[in-house]
Image (cartoon, coloured by chain):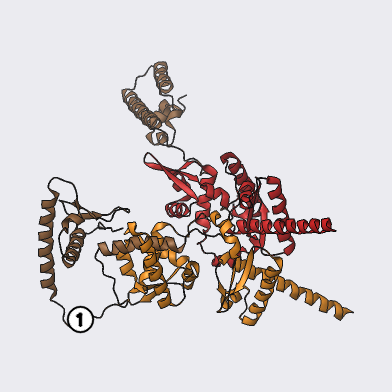
Chain colours: A brown, B red, C orange
Amino acid sequence: MSSSIEKPFYFQPPLNVLFELDKLQKILPWDISISFLLTSFLNEMEKRGEVDFRASGMALDSSATIYLMKSKLLLKLEEPPLPSKPPPDFSPPPLFLPLRYELTSTTIQHLLTVLDEVLTGERLFGLKPRSEPILPSPPDFLPPVDLYMMEIEEKMKSLYRLLRQLVSGEKLVFFSKVIAGLEKLEAIKTFITLLFLAQTGKVALWQEEDSSDIFITLSEGSVVGGDRAEII
Amino acid sequence: MLEEIERKSSELLSEEKLKRDSALLEAALYVAGRPLDLKSLGSIIKTRSKRKVQRLVSILMEEYKNRETALEILELDDERFVLQLKAEYSPQVQRLAIRPLLSKGPLKTLSYIAYRQPVLQPQVVDVRGHHAYGHLRQLESMGLISRERVGRTRLLRTTGFFADYFGLSHDLRTMKRQLKRVFEDFEKTEPEKK
Amino acid sequence: MLEEIERKSSELLSEEKLKRDSALLEAALYVAGRPLDLKSLGSIIKTRSKRKVQRLVSILMEEYKNRETALEILELDDERFVLQLKAEYSPQVQRLAIRPLLSKGPLKTLSYIAYRQPVLQPQVVDVRGHHAYGHLRQLESMGLISRERVGRTRLLRTTGFFADYFGLSHDLRTMKRQLKRVFEDFEKTEPEKK
């Protein structure tokens, strides 16, 4: 057993696992039976009649390390297994689209019915049709931008005040209520100011497909930007 | 002598009627642009006799075959008939069709819905990718699929119009069987495309 | 003898080609469902010879006439040809047309463009809302409107196909007058809608 004088018996396999820590890194902890190693180590010492406390301490320390490694692996095993991704579903080839002429049911009457609705909408928003389809050339005199912006801001403030009054507990205001009794031109100006308010996020506008009125809600924490004024 | 004339004139009359009925059926198939069953065809020529309709359409089909034209009348599985362009002419003229035709992507999404229906929207997007949202809108606007709200998502199915358009059965199980056959045929003809 | 065979075979070949070209023209007219001019028809059979197209279509027209069917090919004033249902058959089969050309949203956008054309894109979006961008793409791909670049925006008009579909004049001023007239008549007959 102790063929080598230099090396004590516990440096022989399999006990050497407990004393050469670098070996430990190369072995799977599951392959090590701690109780077997320790029992063999104790038996060997008993047989030899010599008790080496330093070696016993090292064996104890190594056993604890191996035990810790096993525990860690166990914990890892307890983690829920990763769901194995199911194989992608069968994706069939595209269908062949046969070409067929088909008489459609849309007639000029349908076109006119919806045209009536669209023109009503055009009137409601006060969007005068631009008679010239080409972009208008800039006028000789443009009002100073600052002045114009100041004016708009004043208008926005007063419209916002009015909207707050009109809301009074309710959640939304109808645009028709805002422009009730106003001249056409004033109504158009109010609508444009309303769009500016919507653009700064102070109000939100929307409209139902089947209604000609615009609903306005006031947003307290105004958000600037965002596409909130969507007119259908 | 008089009898002979009467017989002849009634024969002529019935031949005239036959020709007109046959033309009416052709008109119906042309206008509909989808498969029509014997009942619908019968209602056009004001008869309830399926046999009569069947006979007339068969004559019409034969006539189209003999003419060797770009068009064909096909009989589908369930006694339905459709007038359409022969597939071989499709590539050269499809750009002239009024409706924007579906490209390969939306057609594949449609195939998947047809095959798996009723199917939840997220499953379709999972398999077909995020482009599928656009496909679904397009397919819905063309009346080929319906999207029913179920909780926070949507349940997708193909429509009756879809079945008609592609000449498939309205019965879901039969349709799926038919589709399976179509897909298998496709794989046979385009094995490299798998 | 050999020469004879060669001549025959080349004759057969050219006859084959003629038949195929004729079928292609029929396919084009069938799929388009609207009048096509000689140029468009020529592009289908890959020829620039208007005479050749004219000759082929004439043969096709004759063939349709002889068949005495529900369909006819007509030549319009401006050298355009259309394959269509004979008017006499229309009332009996009209009810089979169940699909609209467009859903309501895009149709609204189209009607507005027709009425205000030529009109700038921003104006259309102003009136019709942001969904209009999608409508415009659809209308353009269906060949119902054209979008011409003008500076940083686009000028919109309806196309000849639009005029053909709704039976309106190709001349813009005439068309607008027609639209206005029909529209006024229409408003008179549906006063409750106002």
Asked whether A43 or C85 is in front, the reply is C85
The image position of residue A74, as x and y in percent, is: 39, 29
Position of the C terminus of chain A, as image quadrant, is bottom left
- In the displayed orientation, state which residue is furthest to the bottom: A140
Residue B59: image location, x then y, percent: 73, 55
Residue for point 20% across, 81% down: A139
* Residue C115 visible: yes
How many labels, in total? Answer: 1
Q: Residue furthest right?
A: C1
Q: Is residue C160 left or right of residue C53?
A: left
Quadrant hosting residue A201:
bottom left
The one of B2 and C68 positioned closer to us in this rendering: B2
Percent of width and height locating residue C88: 60, 63
Q: Quadrant of residue C11?
A: bottom right
Q: Is residue B159 above or below residue C12?
A: above
The residue drawn where x is 37% and y is 34% is A21
**Above-or-below relation of A224 to A66:** below
Name the chain under label 1: A
Local SS, label 1 = loop
Pointer 1 local density, CA inside 10 Å: few below 14, some 14–19, many at least 20: few
Residue hosting label 1:
A139
Residue A11 visible in the picture = no
- Looking at the rendered structure, the kind of residue marked 1 is Pro
**Foreground residue among A66 and A60:** A66
Q: Which residue is rendered at x = 11% and y = 56% of the image?
A: A162
Residue at screen point 58% across, 56% down? C92
Counting from the top left corner in percent of width and height, residue C76 is at: 57, 76
